Image: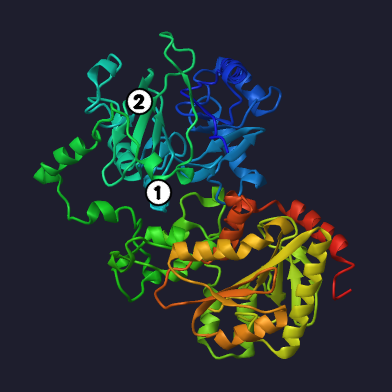
Amino acid sequence: MAPPRILLCGDVLGRMNQLFKRVQSVNKSAGPFDALLCVGQFFPDSPDRQEEFMDYVEGRSEIPLPTYFIGDYGVGAAKVLIAASKDCVNQGFKMDGLKISNNLFWLKGSGKFTLYGLSVVYLSGRQSSNGQQFGTYNQDDVDALRALAEEPGIVDLFLTYPFLTNEWPSGVTNRAATSDIPAGISDSSGSDATVADLVAEIKPRYHIAGSKGVFYAREPYSNIDAVHVTRFLGLAPIGNKDKQKFIHAISPTPASAMSAAEISMKSPNTTLSPYTLIDQAANSKEATKRPNDSVLDSQYWRYDVPQKRHKHGGGDGDRLCFKFIYSGTCPRGEKCNFRHDTDAREQCLRGVCLDFIIKGKCEKGPECNFKHSLQSEGESHSHRRSASENAAANRSKECWFCLSSPNVESHLIVSIGEHYYCALPKGPLVQDHALIIPVEHSPNTISLSPESEMELGKFQSSLKLYYKKQEKETVFFEWVSKRGTHANLQAVPIPSSKAALVQEIFNLAAEKLGFKLLAIKSNNSSDGRKSLRTQFDRNSSFFYVELPGGTILSHIVEENERFPAQFGREVLAGLLNIAEKADWRNCTPGKDEEVKMAENFKKRFEEFDPNQ
């Protein structure tokens, strides 16, 4: 496939007519281009441009290609962005952009996403510690970015938005050819050490920034502990009086699709990293020295843990590993100085606010899109008590899947049997993605009674026939947590053309995470599940996936093993080329839409429903 073609733009300042007139001209002469990425101030700098700007936001004027912008400052910014944040289509983690209008997306705070195969990381605003809502980023954004950037693979594009103080990364002109540095540009003022630190850690192939008022394409520089080079591009604002370049085209092949030889190629004008000079200067000052691990450790923890969440165990007793909570893994493993709290990780996966989990409070208040209560707190208490009726009742009240719970999403239920019911998930991976859930509060579907197993088999067979009518095959998978949450067997329809690839992609994903899946070959689901029960250890967490041909792949999770609870979904999202849907919170429609989805599913499924 041809590399994606991307347009980069500096400060727009609300000049939308001028921007898209130029974009259409470039697209006609050198395109077509796939996307436009804007750095610097996107919103108007004066009220007289607000009407022109709002024509595009409200859909009266057309945006010709997908346009992504970072930054949240300018005339009308607060009103537009607060409204977008509350829109139901933008709920949950939306690192790939909150939709403002057709073809216009806001990259909020910090994040990482994939755009036409390119790995894109961004940081928006200037650094702030006073809680200002707009125009700033905070330490949470920086730590989240570091955690995301620790993931395997090379970052292709890093976008930074130097708000107001004209912040380019400190030292970016070090070791550069002085003849190429624009007049008046120096690091004596208006530079950002935080961005410089991040660039040195992330090592992107391209770093794009705006707001210095000039265009500057620095020579590529080599990175420490990496074979590839980085290119810095500073872009001028639209309508600048010196007619400096404000739009620039690139067409990079994604690093994930390049060979090792291609990645390591260097042009003759490649310089040493400009940021090693900063490191040397900092290390020479005794007053600024800190313990050896303190700089690295700042990536992994954020807040002191509230007293109520203190636990005994390894690591720093009152700090949690941010990296582990956010992504489920930590590259430092047992060497990490901070606690890998699996309970906190589970709460994060249940949609609980990260600030609330770690700090016990959230300053965003009602503006926050996540839950401000520990979803399984009552449940975990009930597990520690005897299995009395009273404990079971309390547990059911807290559980999302117990039919007696006030928290159950009853509008998503599509069929109820004696031992199992079928429902649509809150954030479906694809259309007709379904869950088969025990009516009884059970931590897994593997160890239930033979009568329950027979009914489960009927549900599975019915879903297979239903999907078959759509020329699709079925993948079933279940994550069994030793913490004993309510079981749900997930059923995901996939195109028949991809059925032969499922086993290979699961094996590759497992290999990448450092374990192997055990294969149980069987001609039918019933025999495969019988064999599965002989492996099952209810004292361990467990994952298995049933492939379209009947083969079951399984893995028993060791005591200290880092295993992503969303592994099954993430692998299928990759297979189906919808990586942005790997997190269910990116896929949650509003309740009205969920009701429609459930009703439509019921009508189509009626002829196959074993309970009709």
Question: Which residue is found at the position 26% from the left and 43% from the top?
Answer: 224
Give, as a three-letter code, the residue at label 1.
Ala
Between the C-alphas of marks 2 and 1, the distance is 24 Å
Q: Which mark identifies residue 149?
A: 1
Q: Is residue 550 left or right of residue 379?
A: right
Q: From the image, which quarter does the N terminus lie in? A: top right
Question: Which residue is found at the position 22% from the left and 57% from the top?
Answer: 293
Identify which residue, 296 or 607, lies in the foreground.
607
Q: Which residue is mark 2?
A: 166
Question: Which residue is found at the position 33% from the left and 76% from the top?
Answer: 312
Q: From the image, which quarter does the C terminus lie in? A: bottom right
Task: Measuring from the top left, give residue 356's x and y in whole percent.
Answer: 46, 59
Residue 482 appears in the figure: no
Task: Measuring from the top left, give residue 138's x and y in whole percent.
Answer: 39, 43
Where disc 1 sits, the SS reads helix
Q: Is residue 232 above or below residue 506?
A: above
Q: Is residue 290 left or right of residue 89?
A: left
Q: Is residue 429 left or right of residue 458?
A: left
Q: Is residue 575 left or right of residue 284?
A: right
Q: Nearer the viewer, mark 2 or mark 1?
A: 1
- Is disc 2 surrounded by few (<14), some (14 to 19) or many (20+) residues within 10 Å? some
Q: Which mark identifies residue 610?
A: none
Nearest to N terminus: mark 2 or mark 1 = 1
Identify which residue, 509 or 316, lies in the foreground.
509
Q: Is residue 10 above or below residue 410?
A: above
Identify which residue, 230 or 314, lies in the foreground.
230
Residue extending furthest toward the front: 261
Identify which residue, 390 or 30, lies in the foreground.
30
Task: Measuring from the top left, give residue 519's x and y in whole percent.
Answer: 57, 76
- Circle count: 2
Question: Which residue is found at the position 61% from the left and 55% from the top?
Answer: 575
Quadrant in the picture for residue 436:
bottom right
